[in-house]
Amino acid sequence: MAGHLLILGAPGAGKGTQAMRLAGKHRWAHISTGDIFRRHGERGTEFGKKIEGYLKAGELVPDSLTCEVLVDRLSQSDCDNGYILDGFPRSVRQAEQLDRMLEEREEALDAVIVLDIGDDEIVERLTARRNCPKCGKIYNLKFSPPAIEGACDNETCGGAALEEREDDCEETIRQRLKVYHESTEPLIEHYAARELVQSIDAAAEGPCEIADKIEDILLAQGVS
Ligand code: ADP
Ligand code: ZN
């Protein structure tokens, strides 16, 4: 069944990990604006050059550019079977634009899942975060290290060397947290008014327990 989910939470709360897992399990599209932006940066596209500075500084990419990316992504056919929004919307303005896009597509959000976690825990996590450049799998050197140090576990990746994101240094993490509290956190209210919000304590639980809780929420909403 097509599900339309939004995962909200501070950087490093575990949105990407959960979104990737849900997308694989339910065959929904995983839409991460951050991933799309980073790919543009890596490929050195014109668009990538426009947005690079914002990512490095931990600032939001302007709404107009972000919405452009989202409209384009939603037009791809894999979204017809449902999708998970990871990292969009990040401001009330983006949320209003999303409302309009959903209306046009005659779709509605089934749930807004908030992964709740404190700032200090975030800094600890993000400085230990690594990812595989080939399959995108996210590791944490402290909590979920790979079997072989520095290499991806997936056989198909052939031991690819794990990488660290350029914006995962403490100074930029603090800036991203500030932006989260100022611009993104107010969205919880925006969606709470529609009784869509389901919060999960993302600091107390491991990724598997959080995944189970999300599945319970989906079942309760009649999406599975
Ligand atoms: P995280 O949630 O860990 O910060 P993301 O990959 O979601 O990581 O985002 C990385 C960066 O990409 C952000 O710090 C911001 O610069 C930019 N970005 C991602 N999504 C948006 C968005 N919806 N609006 C504006 N900027 C965004
Ligand atoms: Zn890999």
Image: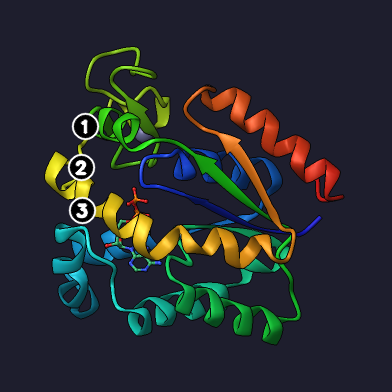
Contact check, label 2 and label 3, Cβ < 8 Å: no
Residue 162 vs residue 94, the one in the foreground: 94
Q: Residues within 10 Å of mark 2 (few under 14, many from 20)?
A: many
Q: Which residue is mark 1?
A: 127
Residue 168 vertical placement versus 194 (above, below) = above
Amino acid at pointer 3: Gln
**Residue at left 63%, top 60%?**
83
Of the numbered discs 2 and 3, the one sitting upstream in the chain is: 2
Of the numbered discs 2 and 1, the one sitting upstream in the chain is: 1
Q: Is residue 163 left or right of residue 74?
A: left
Of labels 1 and 3, the one closer to you: 3
The C terminus: image quadrant: top right
Q: CA distance from mark 2 to mark 3?
A: 11 Å
Residue 36 vertical placement versus 76 (above, below) = above
Q: Position of residue 188 (x, y in %)?
A: 56, 58
Q: Which residue is mark 2?
A: 168
Q: Is residue 79 left or right of residue 69?
A: right
Contact check, label 1 and label 3, Cβ < 8 Å: no
Q: Which residue is mark 3?
A: 175
- Total labels drawn: 3
Q: CA distance from mark 2 to mark 1?
A: 6 Å
Of labels 2 and 3, the one closer to you: 3
The answer to whether residue 183 shows anywhere in this view is yes
Label 1 sits on a secondary structure element that is loop
Residue 8 vertical placement versus 123 (above, below) = below
Label 2 sits on a secondary structure element that is loop
Q: Quadrant of ligand 2?
A: top left
Amino acid at pointer 1: Thr
Of the numbered discs 1 and 3, the one sitting upstream in the chain is: 1
Contact check, label 2 and label 1, Cβ < 8 Å: yes
